[in-house]
C-alpha cells in the first residue's frame, strides 16, 4: 500500500493546508519583490525624465509668451501706437529672448542626460537671428515695417 493511504484524514488535511500556506507565502514574496523592483524603476525614471519634461514645459511656455509679445508688437506698430509703448514691449521681448537663450545654454551645460540636442540649440540660434516681422498691410504705418526687434 501507499504511505499516504495509511495516514489519518486529520494528517492529510494538515499537510494540504501546509502546502497551500507555503504556496501563498511564495506567491506573496514574489509579488513583494516585483512591486519593489517596479517602484525602484519608477523612481529612477521619474528622477531622469521629470526634470527634462519640466524644463521643456517651461521653455514652451516662454516661447508662447514671446510669440504673443511679437504679435502684439506688430499689431501695435501697424496701428500707430506710441513709441514709448512699443519700446517698452520691445524691451520686454528682448529680455525674454535673452532669458530663453540663457536657459537653453544652461540646459546644454547641464548633465548629459538633460542636454538638448545640438541641432535644437543651433535651430534656436538661427531662428533668433533670422526672425523678422511681417510687413504692414497699411502703407501709412512706418513703424510696422521696421525689423524685429526694433
Image: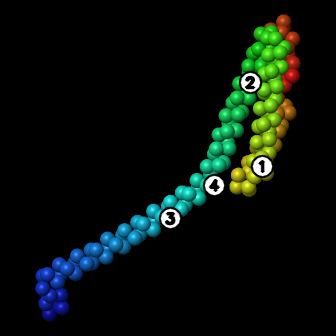
Q: Is residue 134 above or below residue 96?
A: above
Q: CA distance from mark 3 to mark 2?
A: 48 Å
Q: Is residue 58 above or below residue 43?
A: above
Earlier along the polypeptide chain: callout 3 or callout 1?
Answer: 3
Q: Residue at x 80, y 41 (%)?
A: 102
Helix, strand or loop status at disc 3: helix
Q: How far from the left and from the top, in percent, is residue 4?
A: 18, 87
Helix, strand or loop status at disc 2: helix
Q: Is residue 75 above or below residue 93?
A: above
Q: CA distance from mark 4 to mark 2?
A: 33 Å
Q: How far from the left and from the top, in percent, is residue 76?
A: 77, 14
**Which circle marks residue 108 in the picture?**
1
Earlier along the polypeptide chain: callout 2 or callout 1?
Answer: 2
- For disc 2, the neighbor class at 10 Å (few under 14, some 14 to 19, many from 20) is some
Choose between 13 and 138: the one closer to the eye.
13
Q: Residue at x 84, y 14 (%)?
A: 83
User: Is residue 93 something one can see in this rendering?
Assistant: yes
Earlier along the polypeptide chain: callout 3 or callout 2?
Answer: 3
Residue tagged 2:
69
Residue tagged 3:
37
Earlier along the polypeptide chain: callout 4 or callout 3?
Answer: 3
Is 130 left, or right, of 16 in this rendering?
Answer: right
Q: CA distance from mark 4 to mark 3?
A: 17 Å
**Which circle marks residue 48 in the picture?**
4
Amino acid at each position: 500500500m501507499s504511505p499516504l493511504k495509511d495516514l489519518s484524514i486529520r494528517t492529510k488535511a494538515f499537510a494540504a493546508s501546509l502546502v497551500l500556506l507555503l504556496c501563498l507565502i511564495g506567491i506573496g514574496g514574489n509579488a513583494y519583490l516585483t512591486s519593489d523592483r517596479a517602484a525602484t524603476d519608477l523612481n529612477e525614471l521619474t528622477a531622469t525624465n521629470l526634470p527634462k519634461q519640466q524644463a521643456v514645459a517651461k521653455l514652451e511656455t516662454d516661447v508662447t509668451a514671446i510669440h504673443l509679445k511679437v504679435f502684439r508688437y506688430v499689431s501695435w506698430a501697424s496701428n500707430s501706437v506710441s513709441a514709448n509703448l512699443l519700446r517698452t514691449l520691445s524691451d520686454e521681448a528682448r529680455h525674454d529672448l535673452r532669458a530663453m537663450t540663457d536657459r537653453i545654454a544652461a540646459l546644454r551645460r547641464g548633465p548629459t542626460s538633460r542636454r538638448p540636442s545640438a541641432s535644437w540649440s543651433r535651430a534656436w540660434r538661427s531662428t533668433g537671428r533670422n526672425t523678422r516681422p511681417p510687413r504692414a498691410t497699411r502703407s501709412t504705418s512706418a513703424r510696422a515695417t521696421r525689423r524685429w526687434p526694433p
